[in-house]
Amino acid sequence: MPREPIYAVIDIGTSKVVSIATRLGPEGELKPLGVGSTPSLGVRQGIIDDFGEVRDAVRDSLKECLRYVGRNPVGDFFAVVNGDHLVGENSLEVMGDGEELVTVTEQHLRSLVSSASGVLQQQLDSRSEQVLHIIPMRFRLDGVAGVRNPTGLHTNELQLEAHIVRGMSVPLGNTVRALQSCKLRVEGLVAHPLASGEGVLTADEREMGVVVIDVGAGTIKIAAYREGTPFFSSVLPMGGNQLTRDMAIALRIPYQMAEDLKIQHGHVLPDELAPRDEVVMPATQVQPKRIVRRQEFCEPLYLRSLQMLKLINEELSKAGMESSPPGGVVLTGGGARMPGFAEMTARGLRTQVRVGVPLWYAGLPESLRQPEYAAALGVLQWAVKHRHQPDQGRIRGEGERNWSPGALLRRPFARAGARQSGRD
Ligand SMILES: Nc1ncnc2c1ncn2[C@@H]1O[C@H](COP(=O)(O)OP(=O)(O)O)[C@@H](O)[C@H]1O
Ligand SMILES: [Mg+2]
């Protein structure tokens, strides 16, 4: 019997490095084989800033993950990439000369995506930027927009509306180097906002229109979906670490003590707490043990969360989302566990909010159904879904220059097809 393929993912987060190995069953189902999660020290706001620390954390995480899998049976890894250098934009690629009637085939669609990728890569300076994803949203047939699947339809000119994610080559390359230094082959990179969306959003929500907000330790990842596909994605350089830092400063306590107390007693809506609630602050090198009113203790959390929501709101305005999406907001990432944050988000963004844990599937251990595993499990789903589409999140070569959105070229069907066969 042929061996079932293994899919593995690694998420180098600001607070933890998670690795998960799974087998892909005959029905397309994932069967987890091992999980490793170790603290991450060498990452700041989603970007590696201490290579040695990251390499060690990746090594430890893998050791834990592969403990039960045997000796190195896992070949290729998919990885989550993060940082506010990731840019999501929508663009248009055109195929056909507008004169010759053609019946659109699957091959045309593949060629269109592939040629869009080729054009973008040529226009980018690979030393500074790389294209990570080209996700088809809709097609236009002779200018008529909104076609979901043009296969079998006639047109003179076919246009692809796509959501494109690009990022800076140096941080992306450093992630790959860190993984390679642990003898991992990197099969693909997936941008964190889309990985989180993949991990926690249902197909119905994506169809209806929904926003996923992943609050991690150092970054907030936002992705907006409608009619089944993402049309906006972005990363803000702030997260749960800032809440901790604010508390450490306000209460004059060490950072790690602030983190522990935040998780034990934190709440972002102090007005909802009983006025008599108290928090015992252990003695530090500079202060004796003391007791603080919990409302006072939580005040910095309220102020910082309010500021985060304001910035999230500004991002959503950039996405053209003036009214709340029909499917509401799904909050995920470790920061989504913060008591009161979902309620505050619902009030601030005037929409319904749920806390998203990774979507359930048979065999998924309960321990992984936590918001902080959204991205890692999302990438596994992504890898399986895109296993036949070589343009999504592949590692790129060198020698490309800058591109500007909208500067995509018109190209006839034949040439786009030729480009495709050349690449294969
Ligand atoms: N119960 C909790 N209450 C409040 N914040 C929490 C809780 N659990 C985790 N967090 C916060 O979530 C953040 C880590 O989220 P995570 O998604 O794991 O981040 P990353 O992917 O960046 O490593 C940290 O800032 C941590 O303090
Ligand atoms: Mg994360």
Image: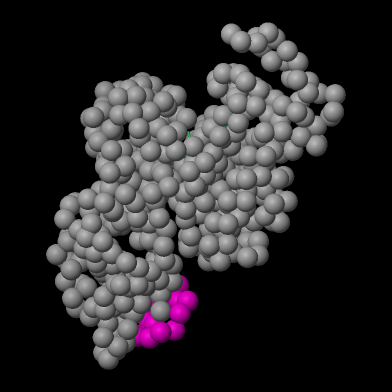
Residue projecting furthest to the left: 422
- Residue drawn at the location 27% of the way across and 82% of the way down: 96
- Residue drawn at the location 40% of the way across and 55% of the way down: 87
Horizontal and vertical percent position of residue 91: 38, 69
Residue 107 occupies quadrant: bottom left
Residue 248, above or below 409: above
Along the viewing direction, whichever of 412 and 151 lies nearer the viewer: 412
Does 153 appear in magenta?
A: yes
Q: Is residue 103 visible?
A: yes
Residue 204, above or below 177: below
Horizontal and vertical percent position of residue 128: 26, 51
- Relative to 341, 410 lies left or right: left
Colour scheme of the picture: one colour
- Residue drawn at the location 28% of the way across and 48% of the way down: 169
Considering the image in quadrants, where does the N terminus appear? top left
Along the viewing direction, whichever of 79 and 48 lies nearer the viewer: 48
Horizontal and vertical percent position of residue 167: 34, 51
Does 212 appear in magenta?
A: no
Along the viewing direction, whichever of 371 and 308 lies nearer the viewer: 308
Considering the image in quadrants, where does the C terminus appear? bottom left
Along the viewing direction, whichever of 149 and 181 lies nearer the viewer: 181
Residue 21, above or below 113: above
- Relative to 242, 352 lies left or right: right
Magenta part of the chain: 141-155
